[in-house]
Image (cartoon, rainbow, N blue to C red):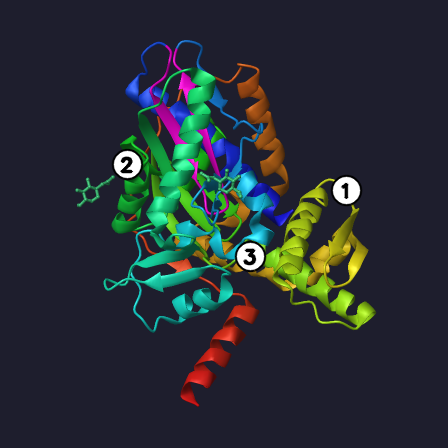
Amino acid sequence: MAGSTGSFIGGGILVLLLAGWLGQKYGLPPPPPKIAGIDLGTTYSSIGIYHAVTGETIILADDLGKKSIPSVVAFLPNGTVIVGSRAVEQQEHNPKRTIYDAKRFIGRNFERDNKDFLADQKRYPFKITLDPNGRAFFEIPLDEGTKYVYPEEIGAIIINYLKSAAAKHLGAVLGQVVISCPAEFNEKQRNFTGIAAEIAEMEVRRVISEPTAAALAYGLHKKQGVENVVVVDLGGGTLDVSVLWLQGGVFVTQAMAGNNRLGGQDFNERVQKHLIEKISEKFEKTIDDKEDIQQIRLEVEKGKIRLTNVPSTTISLNLKTVGKWSYELTREEFEKLNEDLLKSIELPIAAALEDAKKSANYGVDPELAVVTGASVQAGVIGGGWPLQVAAMELPAKRRKRHFFTEQQKENEQDRAAATEL
Ligand SMILES: *[C@@H]1O[C@H](CO)[C@@H](O)[C@H](O)[C@H]1NC(C)=O
Ligand SMILES: *[C@@H]1O[C@H](CO)[C@@H](O)[C@H](O)[C@H]1NC(C)=O
């Protein structure tokens, strides 16, 4: 459930809007369209186009029929590159060469003793290193030697995959793009997001903020009396809260808050840990096999998504260490395991509203956000909701306020204590 709203926004709606927005802004020539809208997300990415003649916005699927492509790139020992769902499928057999979360590192420089970076180095199964300028890159062991890949190059591989998928549908290559990025991205991060598209041989028409895109996708710029919008985007790895002020067709970011280290993955990890404890108890064995852990990770993610629609679901595993084992996970238990994480979402919402000196009564109800989005999408698929978007955005001059969960604070204290010793 936690991931569902986020990935919904991140995985589809954003592209609807980008494509629609760019169609309006640049007045696309009759088909085939030349400009794509791309949402390069931390966990999922998508591509869409806008047909100027029909006013239709279309999200394009890859050859597996997926409109949300996992932002995962894998390398085989012989150098073959695999993207999206295929990369996820082989992840458990190839953890050192399967790169995900690359967006977290794009356009950033780190000090060698940066605590967050050192924690990330431990956390990911693949190798991340800093170059002499403090830029992070991935080290991938191949038959021919080590391959060095920068985050924007991973982004480019994903963009290229989306571009090829679109080309198959359209019979023509899309050469230009409007691409989205988090509201808090600074100039350098936006620049490298653009560079990712350029490496994929696309001309960047604009880099647009995700909350603005989401607000546009929900049609909020056209609603009578809407002046302020709160966008809560709980994605795979990050929580972003933005308060936007809509004035004369221009979105101005009033306040930003969030937690860069909180997302669907954290909710998964809680469940994963819980399952591993149950298994260890039952079989009196330690579960530390990398492939086993990867399998648990994938099945937990699938189970979580199923819990969006059903109150209870079975997680079935077949592990190297203990063989077959299954567990009935209820929504109630999921919420209990994640109680503090769910609670921690409220802090940045309150802070952003306070910063924007507003009250909470016009906030987007997360329960309704999905159905609202679904209706919008239905309207678009039915051709009944041509996106004639006039809204623009002004870059944020505000700083994003960061909030941490209780557990993150404890970890931080533990690390600090360890350093002092
Ligand atoms: C690389 O390895 C994969 C898996 O073993 C194989 O399917 C593929 O054909 C190989 N590609 C090349 C270019 O040798
Ligand atoms: C990135 O920044 C460089 C240096 O300022 C600039 O030359 C380049 O055009 C920028 N690229 C994009 C895609 O923004």
Most prominent secondary structure in the magenta stretch? strand
Label whose residue precedes the other's in the sequence (2 or 3):
2
Vertical side of 30 occupied by 178: above or below: below
> How dense is the environment of label 3, judged by Cα within 10 Å: few (below 14), some, or many (20 and up)?
few
Residue 156: percent from the left, percent from the top?
36, 40
- Frontmost residue, 295 versus 3: 295
Q: Quadrant of residue 284?
A: bottom right
- Frontmost residue, 246 versus 40: 40
Residue ID at (62%, 37%): 368
Query: Disc 1 and disc 2: Cα gap in Å?
Result: 43 Å
Residue type, mark 2 in image: Glu
Q: Is residue 220 visible?
A: no
Tag shown at residue 170? none
Label whose residue precedes the other's in the sequence (1 or 2):
2
Query: Disc 3 and disc 1: Cα gap in Å?
Result: 25 Å
The residue labelled by disc 3 is 346
- Magenta residues span 31-52
Label whose residue precedes the other's in the sequence (3 or 1):
1
Q: Is mark 2 within 8 Å of ligand 2?
A: yes
- Point out the frontmost of discs 3 and 1: 1
The residue labelled by disc 2 is 198
Say if mark 2 contacts mark 3, CB within 8 Å.
Answer: no
Residue type, mark 3 in image: Glu
Ligand 2 sits in quadrant: top left
Label 3, secondary structure: give it: helix
- Frontmost residue, 265 versus 295: 295
Residue 273: percent from the left, percent from the top?
67, 64
The residue labelled by disc 1 is 310
Residue ID at (38%, 51%): 255
Say if mark 1 contacts mark 2, CB within 8 Å.
Answer: no
Residue type, mark 1 in image: Val
